[in-house]
Amino acid sequence: MESRCENCIIRQFNSLRAMSKEELKKVSDTKTTKKIKKGESIFDEGDKLNGVYCVRDGVSKLSKLSANGKDQIVKLATKGEVIGQRSVIAEETTNLSAIAVNDMEVCFIPKESITHTLHKNPDFTLEVLRHMAHDLKEADDVIVNMSQKTVKQRIAEAILYLKNNFGEDEEGFLALTLSREDISNVVGTATESAIRIISEFKKKGFIHTSGKRIGIKNERKLVELVEGF
Amino acid sequence: MESRCENCIIRQFNSLRAMSKEELKKVSDTKTTKKIKKGESIFDEGDKLNGVYCVRDGVSKLSKLSANGKDQIVKLATKGEVIGQRSVIAEETTNLSAIAVNDMEVCFIPKESITHTLHKNPDFTLEVLRHMAHDLKEADDVIVNMSQKTVKQRIAEAILYLKNNFGEDEEGFLALTLSREDISNVVGTATESAIRIISEFKKKGFIHTSGKRIGIKNERKLVELVEGF
DNA sequence: TTAAAAATATGACATTTATCAGTTCTAGAT
DNA sequence: ATCTAGAACTGATAAATGTCATATTTTTAA
């Protein structure tokens, strides 16, 4: 892969595209690339971040652990997304942990390059702001779904979300395979409940499975379910 | 109340404080002040906003209606807060409705003054960004609470939130009185469930009530409950 | 390749929460 | 002051979801 930010395609998908040539050069000169293995954490809840992470490959789950040992996954960040921005901007410790769902490659960008540009380049700041506005809308939608939809509807929605955001492989399975536990943590339910509902969907012919992999067989039915028949 | 933004105290609490004298003058010249009666809406889900609203007095609930007629309140905006920012920045229709919880006075600021400053004054843009980063963190916390806490815990938390954010009156009641229905919509539960739990708190001596008003009698117990004994 | 570990799956049951059907209270209009 | 619509409340169920116990399958790693 290309190692100069100026030439990195990933950049096209995030706010870094609003940086000037010089700003980008500085980022490129100070960034470091890291490989993170499946299951390892990029940062943990409560950490003070010294920069942001730009995802080049793989997927990370952003989640928060509760007292009773349960995890709530708030977001899945994939290729092109920048994580840790919120904490760096607000100058607070992170409220979430970032754990690799599969093997990842990320670029660490020290916060100085970012904060300097935030103060000097309104185009960049506005671009970051727009991204954050989008994230906030999504978060609001999640809140509403959590309170107004049943677990069954939320699981159906999660399956459709995985298809729309990560696609399917040649065999027709979701390209991103999450464990049943991760699915339950996205949806906010007990693992057994998630498993039970997935089995039910399988019996009804909405999906097919092979091990932990899930493939969609009847998308229409899933959509109908999400929308309440 | 003062009618020039330059002299408005409210401004101290929101991102407008990062505007320059000239920018503020322009805002002041183009803004209009509106009075909104309890129960009236400032804008509705799906509206295209031509500006933002700065709350001078009163409280607005930002909520989303679901197919089954239930409302989820995502945020309560009070004196000093600016609402509608997210939609104006993302150039999208609003995802939420804003309804007055009590009589309100708001200033409408046409979006031109805002967007112009967003492009020109990085201090302002960064200030807005910081506020949005804060809102996003709060939204994440709500998501986690919704999935990991019981209805009882969430009601206790809501009562504490109301105390911490809106204070108490001379008689020891929460200064902001929400209907039981609104409380249930904040917490994401059925109105009857909210009522039942409030009655239980009263029986246990955690709170006292008078009509719809609620006062905290044993804050420690409520805090313990939220944290899981 | 195979044993151990981890994840998935299923049943029985407990708990939480929603729903429906009423009654009582309260605030605002007359 | 009193009438009345809308809140607030309560009880009886029903439905959804969580928990615990255990069996089975899949994955991992020796």
Image (cartoon, coloured by chain):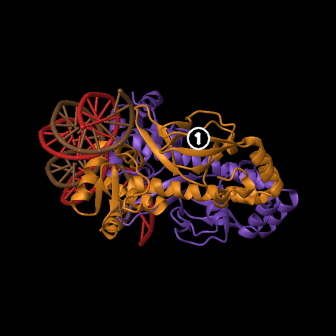
Chain colours: A purple, B orange, C brown, D red
Nearest the eye: A124 or B175: B175
Q: Residue shown at 75%/48% (left/top)?
A: B28
Question: Which residue is nearer to you in this view: B94 or B22?
Answer: B22
Q: Is residue A27 visible?
A: yes
Q: Which residue is mark 1?
A: B35
Q: Is residue A54 visible?
A: no
Residue B224 at x, y = what percent? Answer: 32, 68
Disc 1 crowd, CA 10 A, few/some/many (<14, 14-19, 20+):
some
Q: Position of residue B2 (x, y in %)?
A: 68, 53
State the residue in front, A203 or B106.
B106
Amino acid identity at mark 1: Lys
**Picture quadrant of residue B153:** bottom left
> Which residue is more in the foreground, B192 or C12?
B192
Task: Tell me what residue is drawn at x 59 percent, y 41 percent.
Answer: B35
Q: Position of residue A18 (x, y in %)?
A: 79, 52
> In the image, residue A184 lies at what x, y percent?
40, 51
Residue at disc 1, secondary structure: strand
Instruction: Please state if B75 lies on the left or on the right of D12 as rendered.
Output: right
The chain identifier of the residue carrying mark 1 reads B
* In the displayed structure image, the side of residue B135 where residue A189 appears, left or right: left
